[in-house]
Image: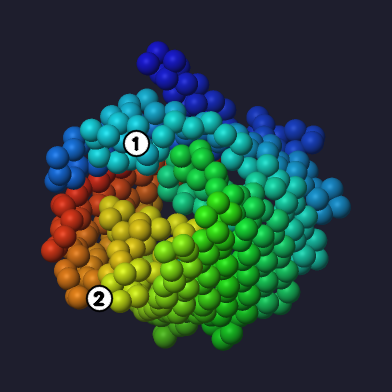
């Protein structure tokens, strides 16, 4: 315990030194240090989970040389209080998915010049709104990929192509893959239209999951009101030793920004194949969607319809966000519960940010009531 307290003190003390102390003639040394409290109180037979977790990512990015850069980043996730179950660590507690890990989070060589880009090595990949491909950045140890990616941007056109050899998961494990990701976007009117194809293959099981879709997101002005809108549609086919399954995905959202306050209404429908398979987001930042209580990180076989309202704005320099979700099954129509999510974040200066967050899930025909809470301080320099 004394070693953990020392690590916490060093992390917080180092953050106060500021960004200017780490610039060198060869590049920049940077760090992202977080300390977060999290609890998970679920109405089941398990004990309430409580965690106080430090997460320090320290890296070096070289200066640009003819468009080339090198980057290495090492990450340490160290629980100070670990009264929780992280991937089976303490099965008597409810889950907080932040185990102790130490790893090279990123190690890459990149090129960027005249609209052409490429990255080779262990890297972060986030596409569109991170619904289908993201880094799961909310958790302490983010997801990264061993991959080769290429990009092209000119005028309103953007192209991404990538081959993934390995996925590096939250708990420090990795999975050998043979994945091909394609995403093409073009600015049309006041928004952006994207088309994508994500073809995933697990090298160990030879199971495949292919997803093809389109997305449009944009905004326009109506007087002093900003109107926002987005829509996505995708189809998915999964093949494994157990057979084949197909499902579709549809998401629609519309809202307005008035005097700095955003109000929006939306629905996500994660389809089902006759109640046997639900549309799946293998590489998505799923915590961002379908409620922060994480009840639907994996889609139920009966599918999921999530209708929600969102409100966001600022008061006294504090970012405020609220969601209310109602969930139901696509197949059979069962009530899958409802959820209220609340967030407050304050950027204190160029280095420090503090925040608090809560999720209140009320069970429907299935599941258990769950309350999750978070409070954190973060320093970037």
In this view, the residue in front, 129 or 234, is 234
| Within-10-Å neighbours for mark 1: few <14, some 14–19, many 20+ | few
Picture coordinates of residue 201, whole percent (x, y): 57, 61
Instruction: Residue 380: name its quadrant.
Output: top right
Above or below, 269 against 59 in this view is: below
Q: Are marks 1 and 2 in contact (CB under 8 Å)?
A: no
Residue 162 falls left or right of residue 319: right
Which quarter of the rendered picture does the N terminus lie within? top left
Instruction: Residue 35: name its quadrant.
Output: top left
Residue at the outermost right position? 66
Number of the label disc, if any, that sits on residue 331:
2
| Within-10-Å neighbours for mark 2: few <14, some 14–19, many 20+ | some
Number of the label disc, if any, that sits on residue 111:
none
Q: Residue at x 19, y 75 (%)?
A: 333
Which quarter of the rendered picture does the C terminus lie within? top right
Badge 1 or badge 2: first in the primary sequence: 1
As helix, strand or loop, the secondary structure at mark 1 comes to: loop
How far is the residue under mark 1 from the one under mark 2? 31 Å
Q: Residue at x 42, y 75 (%)?
A: 246
In this view, the residue in front, 262 or 225, is 262
Number of the label disc, if any, that sits on residue 88:
1
Picture coordinates of residue 8, whole percent (x, y): 44, 23
Instruction: Residue 40: name its quadrant.
Output: top left
Q: Is residue 263 visible?
A: no
As helix, strand or loop, the secondary structure at mark 2 comes to: loop
Picture coordinates of residue 326, whole percent (x, y): 21, 68
């Amino acid at each position: 315990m004394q070693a953990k307290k020392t690590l916490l003190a060093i992390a917080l003390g180092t953050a106060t030194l500021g960004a200017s102390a780490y610039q060198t003639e060869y590049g920049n040394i940077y760090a992202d240090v977080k300390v977060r409290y999290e609890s998970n109180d679920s109405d089941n037979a398990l004990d309430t989970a409580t965690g106080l977790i430090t997460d320090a990512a320290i890296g070096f990015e070289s200066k640009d040389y003819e468009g080339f850069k090198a980057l290495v980043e090492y990450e340490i996730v160290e629980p100070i209080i670990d009264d929780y179950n992280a991937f089976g660590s303490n099965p008597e507690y409810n889950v907080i998915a932040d185990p102790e890990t130490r790893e090279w989070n990123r190690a890459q060589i990149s090129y960027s010049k005249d609209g052409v880009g490429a990255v080779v090595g262990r890297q972060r990949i986030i596409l569109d709104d991170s619904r289908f491909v993201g880094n799961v950045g909310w958790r302490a140890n983010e997801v990264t990929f061993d991959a080769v990616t290429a990009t092209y941007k000119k005028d309103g056109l953007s192209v991404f192509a990538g081959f993934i050899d390995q996925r590096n998961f939250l708990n420090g494990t990795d999975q050998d893959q043979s994945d091909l990701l394609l995403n093409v976007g073009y600015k049309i009117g006041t928004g952006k239209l994207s088309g994508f194809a994500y073809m995933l293959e697990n090298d160990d099981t030879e199971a495949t999951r292919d997803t093809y879709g389109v997305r449009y997101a944009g905004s326009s002005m109506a007087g002093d009101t900003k109107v926002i809108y987005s829509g996505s549609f995708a189809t998915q086919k999964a093949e494994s030793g157990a057979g084949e399954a197909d499902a579709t995905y549809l998401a629609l959202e519309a809202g307005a920004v008035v005097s700095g306050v955003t109000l929006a209404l939306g629905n996500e429908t994660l389809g089902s194949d006759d109640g046997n398979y639900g549309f799946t987001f293998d590489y998505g930042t799923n915590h961002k969607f379908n409620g922060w209580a994480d009840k639907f990180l994996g889609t139920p076989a009966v599918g999921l319809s999530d209708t929600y309202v969102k409100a966001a704005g600022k008061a006294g320099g504090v970012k405020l966000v609220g969601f209310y979700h109602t969930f139901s099954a696509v197949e059979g129509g069962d009530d899958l519960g409802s959820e209220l999510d609340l967030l407050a974040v304050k950027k204190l200066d160029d280095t420090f940010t503090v925040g608090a967050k809560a999720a209140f899930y009320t069970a429907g025909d299935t599941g258990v009531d769950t309350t999750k809470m978070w409070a954190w301080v973060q320093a970037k320099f």
